[in-house]
Image (cartoon, rainbow, N blue to C red):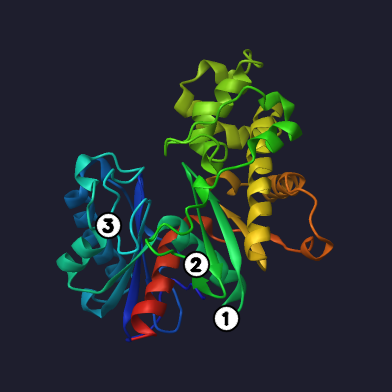
């Protein structure tokens, strides 16, 4: 994939739209695999105001994107849309709504069909973790057909995706790749990190011990930071609002703060235990880490990956060479991955 700001091209375009809890992002992909916008068209998402407002935001964002690229709305032949789940493979949210969209009208809402009806353009839906996984896999392997990757995207929650032999594992009902809700062997984690003894990691899904319950910004705010502040009551973060304090943990960890590094060590070791399970299920060509947790200096990224490896139990000699990669251009991953998959499904296979 190439990514110049614009290109003299008159062929059909595929739009990629990433609708998150805090932002809606749009991009454009041409038939040659070139993204016509070097970054993204981004707006604060008004998801708390319900589906109607967000759908209009998407329409407005697409108009801005085609104007920025010097093209017309009529040039868009297909749209790739991703959102947080849980939702079916067709983009119908759970009867409980999305975990990140709190308005009651999201419950059972058909966001793919709703957007397709407004625009009159075919829309292909992915959950946000799968979309990011498509981007990471494609930037590493291109169009190689027989490669497999597992991606973990550490953000407010933990998304992710599995690309097996070049195809997204979406599952029979669309819930494939819900990696944040894989249960961890927490007793193994406590054996590695005894200071976690007595910690119960509650997940927003209602269970205890999901990967997301220990490896996410929400996990830092709700579980890990309160736990470690009990032992470090004089730490500067102790005087801050929990939500604001949680956001600062990554930067302090990257700067060498000992307590904050302990928190990220927990997250890395938990991710290592998860990756070990994925290795024994898929035997992937690579493992990919993305999200805000590691969008920082290379030195910290290397430290984090080393801690992930320490969390992986002894493996077969043949598996020790499986690389762990950092998601490239992570902030654009969802929109770009959604566009790539829509182009593959709706245009190239038409």
Measure the C-alpha gap from mark 1 to mark 3.
Answer: 29 Å
107 in relation to 241, above or below: below
Q: CA distance from mark 1 to mark 2?
A: 13 Å
Q: Nearer the viewer, residue 31 or 266?
A: 266
Residue farthest to the top, as pictured: 234
Above or below, 106 relative to 231: below
Query: In which quadrant is the C terminus drawn?
Result: bottom left
Instruction: Find disc 3 in the rendering and name its residue.
Output: 92
Q: What residue do we see at 61% from left, 15% from top?
A: 230
- Identify the residue under disc 1: 145
For marks 1 and 3, the one nearer the N-term is 3
Q: Under tag 2, what secondary structure? A: helix
Q: Residue at x 64, y 42 (%)?
A: 270
Callout 1 environment at 10 Å: few (<14), some (14 to 19), or many (20+)?
few
Q: Which mark is residue 134?
A: 2
Q: Residue at x 60, y 47 (%)?
A: 294
Q: Nearer the viewer, mark 1 or mark 2?
A: 1
């Amino acid at each position: 994939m190439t990514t110049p700001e614009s290109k003299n091209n008159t062929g059909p375009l595929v739009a990629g739209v990433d609708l998150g809890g805090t932002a809606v992002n749009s991009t454009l992909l041409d038939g040659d695999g070139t993204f016509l916008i070097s970054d993204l068209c981004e707006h604060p998402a008004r998801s708390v105001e319900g589906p109607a407002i967000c759908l209009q935001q998407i329409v407005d964002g697409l108009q801005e994107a085609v104007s920025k690229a010097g093209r017309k709305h009529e040039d868009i032949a297909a749209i790739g849309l991703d959102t947080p789940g849980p939702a079916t493979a067709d983009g119908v949210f759970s009867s409980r709504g999305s975990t990140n969209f709190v308005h009651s009208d999201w419950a059972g809402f058909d966001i793919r069909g709703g957007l397709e009806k407004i625009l009159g353009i075919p829309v292909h839906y992915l959950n946000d973790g799968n979309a990011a996984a498509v981007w990471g896999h494609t930037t590493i392997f291109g169009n190689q057909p027989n490669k497999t990757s597992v991606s973990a995207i550490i953000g407010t929650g933990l998304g992710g995706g599995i690309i097996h032999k070049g195809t997204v594992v979406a599952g029979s009902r669309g819930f494939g790749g819900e990696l944040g809700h894989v249960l961890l062997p927490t007793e193994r984690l406590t054996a590695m990190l005894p200071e976690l003894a007595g910690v119960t990691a509650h997940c927003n899904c209602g269970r205890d011990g999901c990967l997301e319950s220990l490896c996410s910004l929400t996990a830092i705010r709700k579980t890990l930071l309160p736990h470690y502040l009990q032992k470090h009551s004089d730490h500067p973060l102790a005087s801050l609002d929990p939500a604001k304090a949680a956001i600062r943990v990554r930067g302090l960890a990257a700067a060498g703060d000992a307590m904050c590094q302990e928190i990220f060590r927990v997250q890395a070791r938990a991710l290592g235990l998860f990756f070990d399970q994925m290795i024994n299920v898929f035997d992937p060509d690579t493992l990919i880490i993305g999200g805000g947790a590691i969008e920082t200096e290379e030195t910290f990224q290397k430290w984090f990956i080393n801690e992930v490896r320490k969390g992986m139990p002894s493996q077969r000699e043949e598996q020790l060479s499986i690389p762990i990669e950092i998601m490239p251009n992570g902030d654009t991953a969802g929109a770009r991955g959604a566009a790539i998959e829509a182009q593959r499904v709706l245009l190239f296979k038409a």
